Image (tube, rainbow, N blue to C red):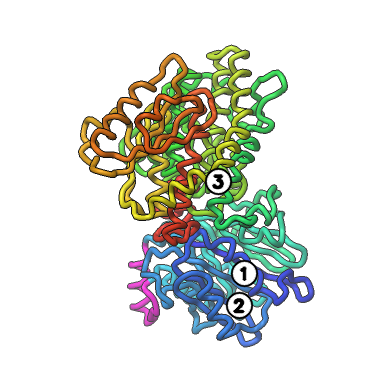
Amino acid sequence: MCGIVGYVGRPGKTTGDHGALDVVLEGLRRLEYRGYDSAGVAVLGESGVESRKKAGKLVNLINELEANPLPESLTGIGHTRWATHGGPSDNNAHPHLADGGKLAMIHNGIIENFADLRQELLAAGYSFASETDTEVAAVLLGDIYAHAGGRDLATSMQLACQRLEGAFTLLAVHEDQPGVVVAARRNSPLVVGLGEGENFLGSDVSGFIDFTRRAVELGQDQIVTITPDHHAITDFYGNPAEGTEFHVDWDAAAAEKGGFDSFMEKEIFDQPAAVADTLLGRYDVDGRMTLDELRIDASDLAGISKIIVLACGTSAYAGSVAKYAIEHWCRIPVEVELSHEFRYRDPILDAGTLIVSISQSGETMDTLMAVRYAKEQGAKTLSICNTNGSTIPRESDAVLYTHAGPEIAVASTKAFLAQITATYVLGLYLAQLRGNLFSGQIKDILADLQDIPAKIQDVLDRADVIKELARSMPDATSVLFLGRHVGYPVAMEGALKLKEIAYIHAEGFAAGELKHGPIALIDDGQPVFVVVPSPRGRHSLHSKVVSNIQEVRARGAKTLVIAEAGDEAVRDYAEFVFHVPETPTLLMPLLATVPLQLFACELASVKGFDVDQPRNLAKSVTVE
Ligand code: F6R
């Protein structure tokens, strides 16, 4: 939440055609998915700090800059906001100024003790132009700079951070120090980008991916000062610290729409590659799982007695799918818990517990806090994550990266399929370590998994059928989703997609639960998606779900069925049938989810909504 960019360049070296502003605006364009309540920039020009900011999307700021241009500069900071303290107004937009307008600050996170600090600063004679916690931090920094900080921005930032509680990434510039941006981070994301004669800061690497792929991840409670030729890291007390340099293995083109109308649609179509890339290099030619990248000892992993998956939203649904597969393959109990509920219920953890966190961003505050809590209680922690350089993998004992590439649309699609794939990889590896599956079985499951990308492509090739269905339902006000077994989390995910981008009331239910209450919702014409399990297989729930379809249909529902190829039994009870290719039941979510994603995406477009930037939401939820 909130996107942050910082830039300093040397004359003649800067990448932006027109200096800092170009670089910062490009970074904000790429980071806008993190929040779009307002946007703002500040540059250090000849006449000191100059800033422009506007409520609403980045385009409003760009219009403002056209009407009211900023001077050329080699030092700049920029911000795109997801509002927490104070509504989305021009006034509350960042940057906030202090020290008589000589200092500008931007912020991501929440400063929990801002009310006390504000009182203290008011008593000292300061006034505030906004309702934000950020302005309090800016005024505090300005005060420290003018007094205790000896007019040195980095020292002042250290002293200011010692007084702040909560979560923050702060970036500041001061007109006394052109060519310097000072940043601090606690519990909120920040990465450094290294250039030649220019350096960058971003909430994540997309903030500077157009300019460099060399990046440095920072630790907790660190301050970094960038100048055109250097970056220096310390802790909050000035002790030198080291960051970890890494190479960003995707390029700027991966974060473009590539001819699609929206990032979301493009990302749905990226899914064959997301699954294939997440499998790549994780097994050998003999079908043995090879997870050398894991930093937890194989013997420790073999001995675990319980897995708890921690995640939120879509990532938690990936965890729910994982539960079925891992319990079946490894015979280890798996609990799936929403991160924000976990640490408030006194969970039972010990050294035999493996915490598997799942997070696309690697920055979700609820999940980060839950992982920290579990570590403190002595559990081992493994992170499944899509974002290199992010906090959750860095703080976990082990990490299994998903290789979905950058996910820009706020609604998660390809990360979900990649997460499910990564949990299968983990499950098969654990089964191998513990001897739960014969190697021949692992090889067979891997062969089925390798077929999945082509099968997703088959679904995508028939996207028009789903789009047409969506276009026929522009006035739907409520859609229900039913599923059983692994189809249940798929139903939940289908409902979440529709809620978040098409703003339509949607609920996912376990089909067996219907008769315990939700069936009362069914009325004439109520659209109900049903994810039908394969009619093949030992534990087939097929006939039970077909009965569920009949039950809702008898009460007037419009039944929209996702079934396996060759399943003709559903036809008699369905207004609409979409067949996905045959696959083993446990892998079915990788196929059955795709039509539901396409449906939500198309219906949101038909309704004229911004598919990539739905209202009230932001990607990467870095507040609790
Ligand atoms: C829904 C969605 C969210 C995220 C959730 C967790 O489309 O994107 O529900 O899945 O906020 O985010 P990560 O995976 O970054 O921890």
Q: Which residue in the protein does label 1 denote?
A: 24
Task: Assign a secondary structure to mark 1.
Answer: helix
The mark lying in front, picked from 1 and 3, is: 3
The mark lying in front, picked from 1 and 2, is: 1
Q: CA distance from mark 1 to mark 3?
A: 29 Å
The mark lying in front, picked from 3 and 2, is: 3
Q: Residue furthest front?
A: 572
Q: Mark 1: is the Cβ under 8 angstroms from ligand 1?
A: no
Q: Mark 3: is the Cβ under 8 angstroms from ligand 1?
A: no
**Residue 573 or 415: which is nearer the viewer?**
573
* Neighbourhood count class around disc 2 (C-alpha, 10 Å): few under 14, some 14–19, many 20 upward: many
Q: CA distance from mark 3 to mark 2?
A: 38 Å
Q: What are the residue bounds of the magenta stretch?
A: 113-131
Q: Where does residue 20 sit, x and y in percent of width and height?
A: 66, 73
Sequence-first disc among 1 and 3 = 1
Q: Amino acid at mark 1?
A: Val
Instruction: Give residue 268's mark.
Output: 3
Q: Which residue in the protein does label 2 denote?
A: 43
Q: Mark 2: is the Cβ under 8 angstroms from ligand 1?
A: no
Q: CA distance from mark 1 to mark 2?
A: 9 Å
Residue drawn 53% across the image and 25% down it: 583
Q: Where does residue 349 sit, x and y in percent of width and height?
A: 40, 29
